Amino acid sequence: MLSRNANYDMDTALNEINEKKLLLDVKVETQLILQLLVSEGIVTREEVSVMREKVKSSQNYKPLYEYFDRAEQKAEYYKNNPEQHLKDVLAAKMNGMIK
């Protein structure tokens, strides 16, 4: 669950652990709130699903989802084409785009 660097650098490990715990806490709190709203009859599961899609497609969040989709596609491409990944990394290093 932690990056390779976290195995060697304890500050990195602690930072990654805290970030993952925060994400988990947010997920738990979100589920708690949704379950309370549904169990109290304030909203239905269907209304939650409709609103989730509405929020995801809003101007605030849609660009982020699109970015993650592109990044995921790129990672999958490089995972399936490791030679191309190495070529692109080398070219980027040669052009000073990455260190």
Image (cartoon, rainbow, N blue to C red):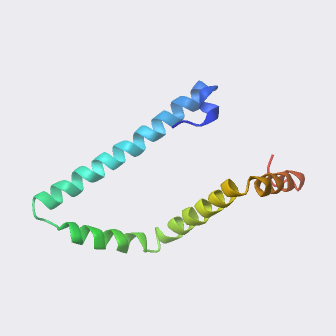
> Left of 24 or right of it: where is 77?
right
The extreme right residue here reads 94
Residue at position x 59%, y 32% in the image? 12
In which quadrant of the rendered view does residue 21 lie? top left
- The spot of residue 51 in percent (x, y) is 30, 71
Q: Compared to 91, does 7 lie above or below?
A: above
- The spot of residue 72 in percent (x, y) is 58, 60
- The spot of residue 71 in percent (x, y) is 61, 61
- The spot of residue 76 in percent (x, y) is 62, 58
Residue at position x 53%, y 34% in the image? 15
Q: Compared to 11, does 61 lie above or below?
A: below
The extreme front residue here reads 80
Viewer-side residue, 71 vs 62: 71
Count of labels in the image: 0
In which quadrant of the rendered view does residue 97 lie? bottom right
Residue at position x 78%, y 58% in the image? 84
The extreme left residue here reads 40
Residue at position x 34%, y 49% in the image? 27
Q: Compared to 80, does 54 lie above or below?
A: below
> Left of 25 or right of it: where is 9?
right
> Left of 65 or right of it: where is 51?
left
